[in-house]
Image: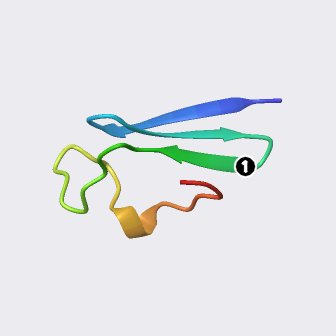
Amino acid sequence: MTTRLRYFGHSAFTVESDGVKLVIDPFFAPNNPLSPAQVDEIEADFV
């Protein structure tokens, strides 16, 4: 089992484990200049 953590800036993260993606984001703005991805580019099973 591999767990992968990805940081999107501010306090947004994805955690991926066993093929399940969890997005943790108390504040993921569509125009966040620090995020390496836009909201519509992120695939998640749970937000």
Where the N terminus falls, by quadrant?
Answer: top right
Number of dots carrying numbers? 1
> Callout 1: helix, strand or loop?
strand
Which corner quadrant of the image does residue 12 belong to? top left
Give the answer, above or below, for where 39 lies relative to 11.
Answer: below
The residue where tag 1 is placed is 20
Query: Hey, what amino acid is under mark 1?
Result: Val
Residue at image position (61%, 55%) is: 46
Residue at image position (59%, 58%) is: 44
- Residue 37 in the image: state x and y as whole percent: 35, 55
Residue at image position (31%, 51%) is: 28
Q: Which of 47 and 38 is in front in this view?
A: 47
Q: Which of 25 and 8 is in front in this view?
A: 25
Left or right: 13, with 20 as reference point: left
In the image, farthest residue toward the bottom? 40
Q: How is the image coloured?
A: rainbow
Neighbour tally class for label 1: few under 14, some 14-19, many 20 plus, Cα within 10 Å:
few
Give the answer, above or below, for where 35 lies relative to 4.
Answer: below
Which corner quadrant of the image does residue 31 belong to? bottom left
